[in-house]
Amino acid sequence: MTLGWILVASVAGGTLSAGLAAASLAVRASWVPMLVSFAIGALLGAAFLEIIPHAFETGEAHQVAFAILAGIFGFFVLEKLLLWRHCHTEDCEVHDQQHDGGRSGALIVVGDTVHNFLDGVLIAAAFLQSIELGVVTAVAIIAHEIPQEVGDFLILLHSGYTKARALAMNVLSSAATVVGGVIGYYSLRLVIELEAILLGFVAASMIYVAVADLIPGLHRRPQLRDTAVQALLIALGIGAIAMVGAALPH
């Protein structure tokens, strides 16, 4: 019975957040570069206001810091591999200023998949305590995920993905929630011991994509009006994460 609740909550937690994020399908293509600023704010807000503090609460500080540093270095190497795989010249589509050949999209999918897996583990841990705590945890996870999933969807569009492919990647990544729920049910202690390291890795993916891949693109529009709009949207992205985090139980 408990496993059934975990499966239902994990499916709901993954698909609902991804489905609500699909509202971004209505976004005009011309808006995507501007709304990437909101995505940057959502990524940085989730990393610094939610994930990193939780990682420090659940693990040893030096261990978490090393996981974040190793994650950033690992994503740098992974992005280099993606560059080498796509192109060996400076004039190929990977170096097109309009998109990055899918690199930032691929990196964000990797990080989001690990994040969804951990959400499934947390759902399992809550339901193993009580049904009521499990339901509250699942609702909180869905609410936390919505602004971040919207940001991820916009990053995939900005990275050159079609709307259909971006939606498919979000849904596929959300399936990791179910995997995390099942593994958490059967081997919670082992997974929980690795939680802080995995959270550090997730935070590293968000920080790297926001700072290394997305923010440099904003500097191509240095005009005062564009800069003011970018700063406002980044602040709104951070604020969306902060408001949801403050309103829901941890």
Image (cartoon, rainbow, N blue to C red):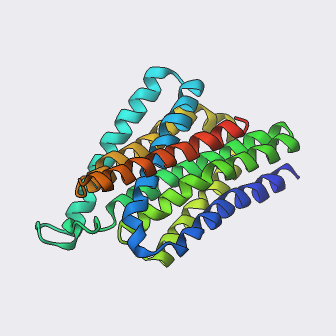
Residue occupying image coordinates x 73% and y 60%: 12
Toward which corner of the image does residue 155 lie, by quadrant? bottom left
Position of residue 189 relative to residue 42, above or below, is above
Residue 127 sits in which quadrant?
A: top right
Q: Residue at x 16, y 72 (%)?
A: 92
Q: Could one spot residue 40 in this view of the protein?
A: yes
Farthest residue, direction front = 225
**166 left or right of 179?**
left
Q: Position of residue 9 (x, y in %)?
A: 76, 55
Taking the spot 12% from the left edge, 71% from the top edge, the residue there is: 91
Is residue 194 visible to us here?
no
Q: Is residue 103 left or right of residue 166?
A: left
Residue 246, placed above or below residue 154: above
| Count of numbered badges drawn on the protein | 0
Q: Quadrant of the C terminus?
A: top right
The residue at the far top in this view is 61
Residue 161 in picture, x, y percent from top left: 40, 72
In this rendering, position of residue 116 left or right of residue 35:
right
Looking at the picture, tell me which residue is in the foreground, 152 or 87.
152
Q: Position of residue 121 (x, y in %)?
A: 67, 44
